[in-house]
Image: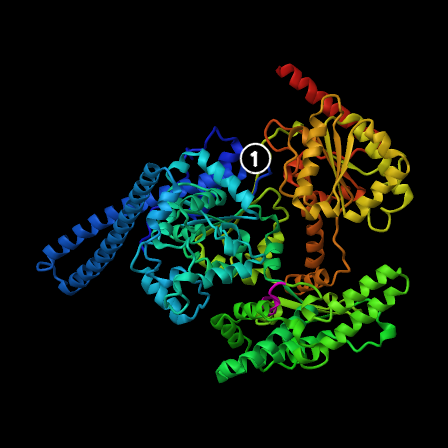
Amino acid sequence: MFSPKKSLEAPNEYEFPFTPYKIQKELMEAVYNTLTQKSIGIFESPTGTGKSLTLTCSVLKWIEDRESLERIELTERISSLDQEVKRIGSSVDVVQDWITASYEATEKKKQLATHRRFQKLLQLHDEHLKEMQKHQIEFHKECRNKHSKVLVSKTEANQQNEVTDPVDWNEHTDNSDMQNQGDEVEEEDKYRPIQIFFCSRTHSQLAQVVREVKRTPYGRRIRCVSLASRLQLCINPQVKRLANVSLINEKCLDMAPKNKDGKENVKTKCCEFRKVNLVQNLSETALFNVMDIEELVGEGESINSCPYYAAREAAKSAQLVMLTYQMLLHRQTRLQAGIDLRGAIVIVDEAHNLLDTIAHLYSCELTLQQLLLVQQQLTLYKKQFLKRFSSASLLNINQLIFIVKRLVKTLQTDTPAAERKVSPICRVLRTYELTAEGEFYNIDLFTLLQFCEKSRLAQKLQGFSEKTDFSKTTVDEQMEGSATKQLLKQIETSHKNKLKNKTVVEKIADVNNINNHTNVNSVTPIIAPFRALLTFIESLTEKAEDGRVVVTSDATSDSTNSTFKYILLNPGAHFADVIRDARSIIVAGGTMQPTRELTEQLFRSCPNRVREYFYDHVVPPDAVLPLVVAQGPTGRRLCFNYTERSTTDMLTEFGMIIQNVCSVIPAGIVCFFPSYEYLDLVYNHLQKFGILERLATKKRVFAETRAAATAGSSVQKLLNDYSAAIKTQGGGGALLFSVVGGKLSEGLNFADDLGRCVIVVGMPYPNRQSVELQERMRYLDVTLSTGAGNEYYENLCLKAVNQCIGRSVRHINDYACVLLVDERYCNSGVRAKLPQWITRSLQIPKTFGAVQAATARFFKNIKSKKFQTV
């Protein structure tokens, strides 16, 4: 691969859609230099400063400059080598050391041949792009002439439903050395441009970035493609109606024009949206027209072509690829999507929870109920097709059944019935300890997983389970052993105990429920439990030091409480291949501090490559008033820790604080509490003592509930009502009670009047008694240094606080007040972990009266400035 010797220097112009602010220009220069130096950059730029647009403009500018430099220097180097070869050839007969001259000439000729070959590949690449662009223009002209997608579908109806390359349709995750060598040989025969992979948390955030790119001059010439799963992109009604993404994937692969062996599938089973010509047309359209996934789906529906495979094909030639965290950070998903990070630029936006995101992606849970269902399904599947299995397949299935039985036995307890009211028993094991206790340590789990993947056993078992009527057979016939019988007996006993205090109608209903539950499949409807088993078995193949298995055994009747949960403790192990393959990595967010744990856990192997950049807010310092409220109106110190926050005195203090704040702050106020339980406690207290009624005379009061947090529509309705109350003239504004870590604390904008004040009550430390948290803290203490666990614990709290603070002040003309209600915010160590744009003007008044006076003065000054401007 050719690499220019000259270094790129940061330009003065980045083709930003408007005049950039000072910090935006500084950020673009820093990103540009980071890419040039092949470094890893950690960037903190407050929310509302145009961070995503700034990142994309700087990276796209670098890509274009790099491609231009590559072509210029390649031409110059070929010309120079050509002249050198001619000079040496003409002087070889007259020089004294003709052997050295001949060797030098040979080496120069080799270099010249290599460069010319690369130039040829580059020319072929450019010609291929021009040909695709020309073809998609002609196709759209043809579509416009026909004026109907029906005519297009009829024209293509007789096209052969064949695929020349079955690899395009199937998803391979096998990474053997032989396959890698074959890929490398194939890659040498074509030019591989440097690609940008831009990932964020959600598709809505990516769609917003795509819209921003369209506003720039790059939107007219950049090749940008948005990737997503079949769940978002599938347009086949038979497939998209399935409720589970795994089932959608399997159904789609079943309908491929060619199966995994490269043989033609039955035409009646083929997907009508996967005709080669139409997929190619949609792929070219997606490549040369910047679209988000909704626009891509709409385009696919208009020409009856599959957006999923079109996007995958287009991504191979794209310069900018948009994708979510899972598609980039989860290795198997990345391989299935055909994403190659070698020499690429990786941008991780909204990366404040990057460590937790990686840990979550590789953690998994397996319940006793799922195990019992899998045991039932595997046993019947084996019995049904026993004569069809080869000896090797039968051995693998028997091993799976054995592992399931041993896991069931590990979870089940022999606790006497009289003692079954006790809380669940939790144990923490290493992976090898679980396999030893389960007595399946001598089974090759890697081979077993390969068998399940190649045979597609999960899909076959799911189809078999859907077609089999389990109700026609008794539990004894379905299961081997007493595991299920014991479970059902526990359920029946529990229900009989509950019948004692119920009416006759309730008793009849409960008895019917018990009878219905004699079928194991109906205890709780669970989709694809075998996939959960495979995910858990795969986690057992991880390095023993990188994770732990939390075994929760519950002796009560609820089998869902007995679980295995694998928790990943070392996220860096699964990010190492990204660091190894990528040319450069940009990690950016609005609240990245503290960054120490990020550098120590993810980039520990390459500290010299890491560069950190922190930027101030675009708003002036006097547009934000951050205050620490350490005392209440009565002079009582405010410490909303777990032991004190529920006392009557503390609740009374908060009631007085919120009344005083609402009397001096206009428009909208958003107040964040540590948990839903505490929000409910405070709300009930305010209601009981008539404080809510008094608040309602000044502002309308809204509260986020746990039920609303789980339903997106309810959250949206809450926001709409809150916004409408603020916009009502003469209404005085609104007060919104929310929860740290809830739906309203991340990803939402409370700009302008929606968030003139953000209040954070207490410090939202997570439950320190959590087994998972204790294991993570213990692991960090051992692997990093003593105290690293406590540092992680405190960082979890402060990052959540920083996210809440960032909901306000969303643009350069915005302004807001931030109240941190707890004396612990006075601690210098805590203040050091707050955002820079907060700490630059953070005040700690000695009394609450001073807080109220400073707040009133702040809004009075803002109002006078606006009046002078007008």
Q: Which residues are magenta?
A: 527-533
Q: Quadrant of residue 686?
A: top right
Which type of secondary structure does the marked residue at label 1 adopt? loop
Q: Quadrant of residue 762?
A: top right
The image shows residue 90 at horizontal and vertical percentages of: 10, 55
Identify the image quadrant of the C terminus. Answer: top right
The image shows residue 635 at horizontal and vertical percentages of: 89, 36
Q: Is residue 759 left or right of residue 204?
A: right
In front of the other: 607 or 424: 424
The answer to whether residue 330 is seen in the rendering is yes
The answer to whether residue 256 is seen in the rendering is no
The image shows residue 281 at horizontal and vertical percentages of: 35, 47
Q: Quadrant of residue 819?
A: top right
Q: Main secondary structure of the magenta part?
A: helix
Q: Is residue 186 left or right of residue 601?
A: left
In front of the other: 84 or 202: 202
Identify the image quadrant of the N terminus. Answer: bottom left
- Read off the residue under disc 1: 49
As drawn, 180 above or below 348: below
As drawn, 469 above or below 31: below
User: For the image shown, how many numbered marks are present on the structure?
Assistant: 1
The amino acid pointed to by label 1 is Thr
